[in-house]
Amino acid sequence: PIRVRLTGVGGYLPRDVVTNDDLARKFGIETSDEWIRTRTGIGQRHIASGDETTSSMAAEAARQALEYAGVDASQVDAVLVATATPDQVFPAVAVQVQAHLGMTAGFGFDISAACSGFVYALATATALMRSGQARKVLVIGSEVFSRLLDWTDRSTCVLFGDGAGAVLLETGAGEGEGVLSTHLHSDGRTGDLLYVDGAVGCPSTSQHLRMQGREVFRHAVVKLSQAVDEALEANGLTGQDIQWMVPHQANLRIIDGMAKKLALSADRVVVTVDRHANTSAASIPLALNEAVRDGRVRKGDLVLMEALGGGLTWGSALIRM
Ligand code: ACO
């Protein structure tokens, strides 16, 4: 069987940092550092400037992942970008990334699964590789949610940030190594809990993110718990076998809840939500990039990923690094 290993990580965070106090004082939002911190764990977020686009950030994260793995862009067979905030409806961000990297072969396409996008892209890439259609694949999450936010709605605008994260996947893992399994779910009946207003070609609509926070929270706790159990059961493992949880970073309370369920101590959970806020599809690869580069996540470690987002979509993945 063809096995898929993770050989490179990269990330990009926009230059501008906006703290919770900045939101209250400079942006004039009726909020406080205390309110945001106690409910979400968020302390600050990075916000993209005009020259920092979904494709430029994705390309920079990808460059770092290639450099980490010692692979040249010309060797890459496919680029998958998970994003809900593409530069344009088309061409896909992935194809623009190919151009940024100087790739003249291979293929690229985007994946739309909101905050679960990275897990979806990882699953898709793994399936392409296992079926022999690609041997080296860049899997990227890149988002500029700051451009989707209604900055007059304090219940959503304080929660998100911008950024990009990337991994390089290559075939050739040993038995029990690499991507062990991925588990995807979606349910369109809950589409009204978290969505973007309006439609393509409808200039009268606002194109802003809308969310019923409490309901999303309730679904997240139940569905993420199921997705995590599914991943463990599929591999005959228990929570105690996990070295690292690298969750989607939406809210520290959701992350803590999942760690508690798995009986994982806080030092086994990679947390970036305090500094990055929720960067949607970019949050997992950004967190993994940080934890691999600072030496926490090492070769041989079992890493559990989980995410839930608009759709609703949700899922999990297990990787032996
Ligand atoms: N600053 C100060 N007060 C605020 C703010 C703010 N930024 N936002 C809302 N409030 C007020 C509300 O107006 C309300 O006031 P009221 O009681 O006088 O009406 C009060 O705070 C409570 O509002 P709730 O929305 O009920 O607050 P809650 O405790 O549910 O927390 C939150 C809101 C943080 C959004 C929470 O529901 C949550 O984290 N939900 C999960 C959503 C999420 O993380 N989504 C991300 C995408 S999906 C995913 O990735 C999991």
Image (tube, rainbow, N blue to C red):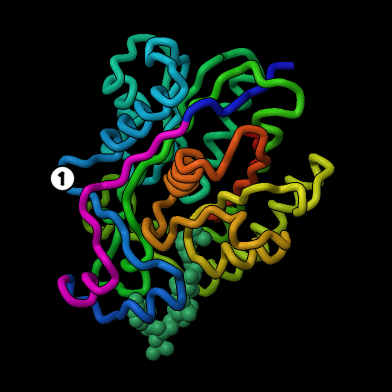
Question: Which residue occupies 48% across, 28% down?
Answer: 8
In the image, what residue occupies the spot 37% across and 56% down?
Answer: 276
User: Residue 194's spot in the image, x, y percent?
Assistant: 46, 61
Residue 112 appears in the figure: no
**In this view, 200 is above or below 249:** above
Q: Amino acid at mark 1?
A: Gly
Magenta segment: 9-26
In terms of image quadrants, where is residue 178?
Answer: top right
Q: Quadrant of the N terminus?
A: top right
Total marks placed: 1
Compared to residue 165, the image places residue 198 above or below, namely: below
Mark 1 — residue? 50
Q: Quadrant of ligand 1?
A: bottom left
- Above or below residue 242? Residue 210 is below
198 up-or-down from 236: above or below: below
Question: Which residue lies at the image location 43% right of the left edge and 51% below the top edge?
Answer: 280
Q: Secondary structure at mark 1?
A: loop
In front of the other: 100 or 260 = 260
Q: Residue furthest right?
A: 236
**Location of residue 236 in the rendering, given as x and y in whole percent from the top left corner:** 84, 43
Neighbourhood count class around disc 1 (C-alpha, 10 Å): few under 14, some 14–19, many 20 upward: few
Residue 76 magenta: no
Tell whether 55 sits left or right of 231: left
